[in-house]
Amino acid sequence: MPKTKFQEVIFTIIMVFFMVYAMICYNTALNIGEMKNEVFLSAFKELSFMGPIAFILDFFYYRSHCQKDLLLSIVNPAKDNPFFLVLAISAISVIFMCPLMSLAATLIFKNAGVEIISVWLETTALNFPMALCWQLFFAGPIVRFIFRHIFRRSLTADNTH
């Protein structure tokens, strides 16, 4: 896991890419009623502006003290198995980010008008199971693997001190 502010920025960028890209593909497939090859390419267009939105929300909002307090009320990093810490971080991330990103998608793409609250809740309900599963089973492990390989020297040096 990130140890410095620079590492946090890099970790967040990688995580945003994997989460936002997958969720854009998922939502596009839902909107057109099927998964097609063209979805993968068109998702990069949306990623160019949804990615920065997710980065700002994740880096500046999600990492606030409130979320850290919630995390520490669920697990004790000093005593609990690190696996439970990773699960808690992943779940809390989805709990906070999914409604926020669903709101952004609702405002940008849905033309909800006076039905904005109900469309946002529906969008969140459709996105939440996918976001949680994608985070726990795919994005989280892949991003941690990539991150460990990018920073293997500095992370190893940190562990030897």
Image (cartoon, grey):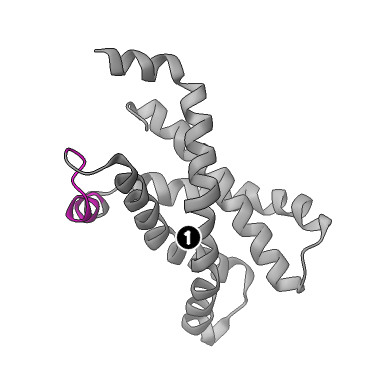
Residue 61 visible within the image? no
Q: What residue sits 62% from the left and 74% below the top? A: 110
Q: Main secondary structure of the magenta part?
A: helix
Q: What residue sits 59% from the left and 66% below the top? A: 108
Which quarter of the rendered picture does the C terminus lie within? top left
Residue 50 drawn at (x, y percent): 58, 53
Disc 1 residue type (three-letter): Leu
Q: Quadrant of residue 79?
A: top left
Magenta residues, as a range?
Answer: 68-78
Q: What residue sits 36% from the left and 51% below the top? A: 87
Residue 1 drawn at (x, y percent): 37, 33
Q: Nearer the viewer, residue 112 or 159?
A: 159
Q: Nearer the viewer, residue 58 or 135?
A: 135
Q: Is residue 73 magenta?
A: yes
135 relative to 34, above or below: above
44 relative to 142, above or below: below
Q: Nearer the viewer, residue 111 or 59?
A: 59
Q: What residue sits 30% from the left and 45% below the top? A: 85
Instruction: Say which element carries label 1.
Output: helix
